[in-house]
Amino acid sequence: MAYRFLPALIFVAVFLFAAALLVFYFDNPIAALSLVIAAFLGALVAHFSFSQKASVSTDAPTQLNESQPLIVKNNSSTEVVPAGALLEATMESMREGVLVVDSGMRVVAANRTAHDIFGSIEERGTPRRLSDLTRHLPVYTAFQTALEAGERSETKVEMHVSATGAGERRVFDLRVAPLMPDEPNGKRGAVGVFFDITRLERLERVRQEFLSNVSHELRTPLTAILTFVETLEDGAVDDRENNRRFLSVIRRNAARMHNLIDDILELSAIEAGTVSVEPTCVRLQSLTADCFTALAPRAAERNIELHNEVGHEVYVYADARRLEQMLTNLVDNAIKFNRDGGAVRVRHESAGERDRVLILDTGEGIAPEHLPRIFERFYRIDRARSRALGGTGLGLAIVKHLARAHSGEASVRSAPNEGSTFTIELPKAVNSE
């Protein structure tokens, strides 16, 4: 009769173990929930693998196997679920990799995610040793600690994932818990859960780089402002020959800080999805003419000609204000990094279901190694020149994100000494011809 209560005893043991983990070990509820599931699986697997016999009477010894049912009761009915099917469905639905090893460090159970991480785990129907799957010492040590000392362990590991073919490097938070045997002299096991934190690590690195870049970009103009303010306070305010020049430097650096903060807020809002675009049919020639009018004084300072080569009949489907913002950023860059006496041209091309707005310049061009990163935040080819020209390093990143907000794309084509061509691709209106 004791056999009848075995599933209930397993459930009670698992939930007690889960409660202990939640109370005493974990701060992260998602991680705790995942390990609760893993503990449940481990309890079942441990019973399948480590218990040779489950004596429920002196007459007929019984062993739990995959055909044995788990009885689930509710208020209206009683359902019978095969234990093996429940185990398999639960393990295969987990996004975390799960490995269960026995006392000999042999892998006796693994889910699909674990196979993706380590490749083929079974070999000719024989459990493989953990050391055959990975030579990563922290992984082996974590399982060994759980087996020998009966203690939980946690470590961060980096390894190449087999399923990606090229061996993509991923970062995992590995948490290993011991599995206690059903019998006093039974063998121990251990269950390990691999939480993929690659994306979190990448985001953290991006965040740190962003803060570092922002701090550096703000520190430079702020230092100049403080320096010249101190100079004026020390008596230079009465120096009629230089005081206005000092004030001009202060104003220029303050404007640079203002522009940088505006760009940071703008980019943050676009990335957060709080900036909405409302596409309408926009006459591209008129929009380009407005952009040229605003930037004409800057172009005239270097004798750069602005050519609007967009046809009068050309319409594109875009948010007029955001498209003007993209055009202004790209034309402004084309003027800044052009040759004296050069030219900037804006053209339109129709390519199937897309409209292309091209901004061409006659500058020095961009070396191939810089092209893949040109739209990154704060990425500059020549930092000193960019700062001298008043650039914040965020203009191209804003263009990229605004183009994607239109379900389009921004790209660049360039070669040294041949100028550059920046392209904004926009989807055509559904009812456009």
Image: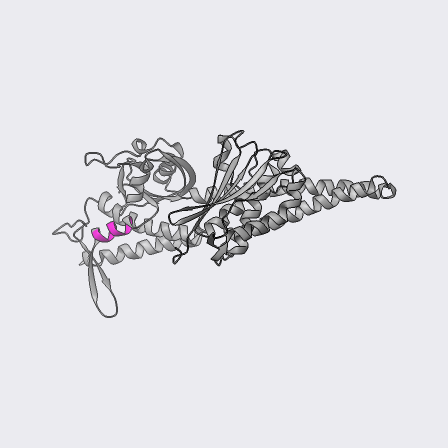
Q: Position of residue 257 (x, y in %)?
A: 66, 46
Looking at the magenta stretch, what is its main secondary structure?
helix
The residue at the far top in this view is 417
The residue at the far front in this view is 312
Which of the two residues, 216 or 147, is positioned nearer the viewer here? Answer: 216
The structure residue drawn at horizontal position 73% and vertical position 46%, both measured from the top left corner, is: 251
In the rendered image, the vertical position of residue 405 relative to residue 234, given as above or below = below
Residue 189 appears in the picture as rendered: no
Quadrant containing the C terminus is bottom left
Which of the two residues, 301 or 86, is positioned nearer the viewer here? Answer: 301
Residue 415 appears in the picture as rendered: yes
Residue 98 located within the stretch drawn in magenta: no
The residue at the far left in this view is 59
Q: Position of residue 274 (x, y in %)?
A: 51, 57
Which of the two residues, 294 or 182, is positioned nearer the viewer here? Answer: 294
Quadrant containing the N terminus is bottom left
Range of the magenta residues? 85-91
Q: Position of residue 375 (x, y in %)?
A: 51, 41
Q: Position of residue 182 (x, y in %)?
A: 26, 48
The structure residue drawn at horizontal position 24% and vertical position 56%, both measured from the top left corner, is: 7
Which of the two residues, 328 or 378, is positioned nearer the viewer here? Answer: 328
Q: How is the image coloured?
A: one colour
- Asked whether, in this view, residue 156 is left or right of residue 363, the answer is left
